[in-house]
Image (spheres, rainbow, N blue to C red):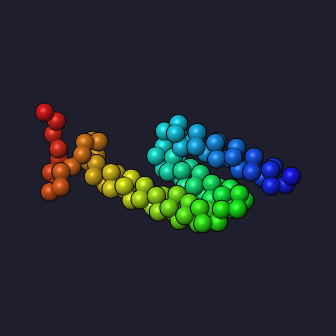
C-alpha cells in the first residue's frame, strides 16, 4: 500500500513539473523542471523494480539532457546582441532582409 501511495504522489509531481516545463515563460525554470521530471521518473522506475531503466533515466533524462539544455541556452544568450538580434559566427550583427 505504501508503494502505491508513493507512486501516485510521484506521478502527480511528475505531471505538475511537466506542466511547469511546458507552460512557464522562463527557459531556465523550464529546463530545471524537465530535469526534475527525469529525476522523479527514475525514482518511479526504481519503485517499479526496473533498476536498469531507472539508472538510464537518471543519467540521460535528468543528467545529460539537462546539461545539454543549459549549454544550448547559454550559447543562445551569448549570441544575442543588446538589441536582441543575433550575431553571425564572425561576430558581425545579422541583419534581416
Rendered residue at 24%/46% (across/down): 86
Toward which corner of the image does residue 3 lie, by quadrant?
bottom right
Q: Position of residue 17 (x, y in %)?
A: 61, 45
* Relative to 15, 81 lies left or right: left
Residue at position x 17%, y 44% from top?
94
Q: Quadrant of residue 95?
A: top left
- Residue pictured at 15% horizontal, 51% vertical: 92
Counting the numbered discs, the total is 0
Looking at the picture, how far across and down is residue 56, in whole percent? 55, 64
> Is 88 displayed left or right of 46 in the figure?
left
Q: Decide if residue 80 is on the left or right side of residue 34.
A: left
Measuring from the top left, give residue 22's x and y in whole percent. 52, 39
Q: Residue at x 71, y 50 (%)?
A: 10
Query: Residue 67 vs residue 44: left or right?
Result: left
Pick the front one: 16 or 84: 16
- Residue 54 position (above or below residue 17): below
Q: Quadrant of the C terminus?
A: top left
Question: From this viewpoint, which residue is outermost toward the right?
Answer: 1
Would you say residue 36 is visible in this rendering?
no
In front: 52, or 34?
52
Q: Is residue 2 above or below residue 86?
A: below
Residue 50 visible in this rendered orientation of the protein: yes
Amino acid at each position: 500500500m505504501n508503494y502505491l501511495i508513493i507512486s501516485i504522489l510521484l506521478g502527480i509531481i511528475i505531471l505538475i513539473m511537466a506542466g511547469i516545463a511546458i507552460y512557464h515563460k522562463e527557459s531556465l525554470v523550464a529546463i530545471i523542471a524537465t530535469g526534475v521530471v527525469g529525476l522523479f521518473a527514475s525514482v518511479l522506475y526504481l519503485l517499479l523494480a526496473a533498476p536498469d531503466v531507472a539508472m538510464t533515466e537518471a543519467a540521460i533524462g535528468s543528467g545529460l539532457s539537462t546539461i545539454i539544455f543549459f549549454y544550448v541556452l547559454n550559447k543562445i544568450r551569448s549570441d544575442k546582441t543588446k538589441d536582441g538580434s543575433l550575431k553571425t559566427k564572425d561576430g558581425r550583427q545579422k541583419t534581416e532582409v
